[in-house]
Image (tube, helix red, strand yellow):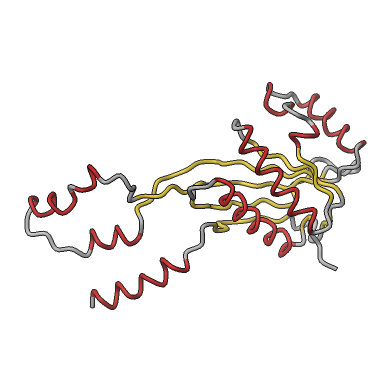
């Protein structure tokens, strides 16, 4: 029975994606929204991560026919220097409209957690230990093993707003995406952007296919 269970777990390990859409919401009042110019804002205290994220997402949106501008180019550090009041945000919105933007995308990491690998968890659970000595001896390598038996999952949130002159800052779409942190941050960003682009296409928000 245990052998069959183990064989059933293997495909799950192989097919497990590094990114996963957890939940999403779309405005029922705006079933279709095509953007002509969007501002991409990565909310992060790490300037390099923010720059890379905005660069990769902007280029991906450009390939879909959407003019995308990195906030780090348009505003430099305006969103990081200090907190903004409602009046100051109105002025920022006005400058965006004057520059021809019709939407803005915010993306941020909302949290993270450590997970035990499925295979390691199965190995621990699938073993019968007669006493605490056997259990300790079997797991003592955890104290000295350099290679981690766990992996980190980042929880992210992306929101797309309309900044049309005739409307308030209307929320068009919001999604939560979980991604497994790989050794290289650029790979995580590319995987994240790939799933985000697909979600926007499927919901006809920002990207609308002819």
Q: Position of residue 12 (x, y in %)?
A: 42, 69
Residue at screen point 87% across, 44% down: 164
Is residue 186 rendered to the left or right of residue 135?
Answer: right
Q: What is the count of numbered marks? A: 0
Q: Nearer the viewer, residue 135 or 170?
A: 135
Q: Position of residue 205 (x, y in %)?
A: 77, 57
Q: Nearer the viewer, residue 23 or 168?
A: 23
From the viewer's perspective, is residue 106 above or below residue 191?
Answer: above
- The image quarter containing residue 166 is top right
Is residue 170 rendered to the left or right of residue 156?
Answer: right
- Which corner quadrant holds the C terminus? bottom right
Q: Nearer the viewer, residue 69 or 84?
A: 69
Q: Position of residue 163 (x, y in %)?
A: 83, 42
Q: Position of residue 188 (x, y in %)?
A: 56, 50
- Which corner quadrant holds the N terminus? bottom left
From the viewer's perspective, is residue 93 above or below residue 62?
Answer: above
Residue at screen point 23% across, 58% down: 124
From the viewer's perspective, is residue 52 above or below residue 117?
Answer: above
Residue at screen point 88% across, 32% down: 95
What residue occupies the far top of the structure in this picture? 82
- The image quarter containing residue 204 is bottom right
From the viewer's perspective, is residue 94 above or below residue 13?
Answer: above
Is residue 95 rendered to the left or right of residue 10?
Answer: right
């Amino acid at each position: 029975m245990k052998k069959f269970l183990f064989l059933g777990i293997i495909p799950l390990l192989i097919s497990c994606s590094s990114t996963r859409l957890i939940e999403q919401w779309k405005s029922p009042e705006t079933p279709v929204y095509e953007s002509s110019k969007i501002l991409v804002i990565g909310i992060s205290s790490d300037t390099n991560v923010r720059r890379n994220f905005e660069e990769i997402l902007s280029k991906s949106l450009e390939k879909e026919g959407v003019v995308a501008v990195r906030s780090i180019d348009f505003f430099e550090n305006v969103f990081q220097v200090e907190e903004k009041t409602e009046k100051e945000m109105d002025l920022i919105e006005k400058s965006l409209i004057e520059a021809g933007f019709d939407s803005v995308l915010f993306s941020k990491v909302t949290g993270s957690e450590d997970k035990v690998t499925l295979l390691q968890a199965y190995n621990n659970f699938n073993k019968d230990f007669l006493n605490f000595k056997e259990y300790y001896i079997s797991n003592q390598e955890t104290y000295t093993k350099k290679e981690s038996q766990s992996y980190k999952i980042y929880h992210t949130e992306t929101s797309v707003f309309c900044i049309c002159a005739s409307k308030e800052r209307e929320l068009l779409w919001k999604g939560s995406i979980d991604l497994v942190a790989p050794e290289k941050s650029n790979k995580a960003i590319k995987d994240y952007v790939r799933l985000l682009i697909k979600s926007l296409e499927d919901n006809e928000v920002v990207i609308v296919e002819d």
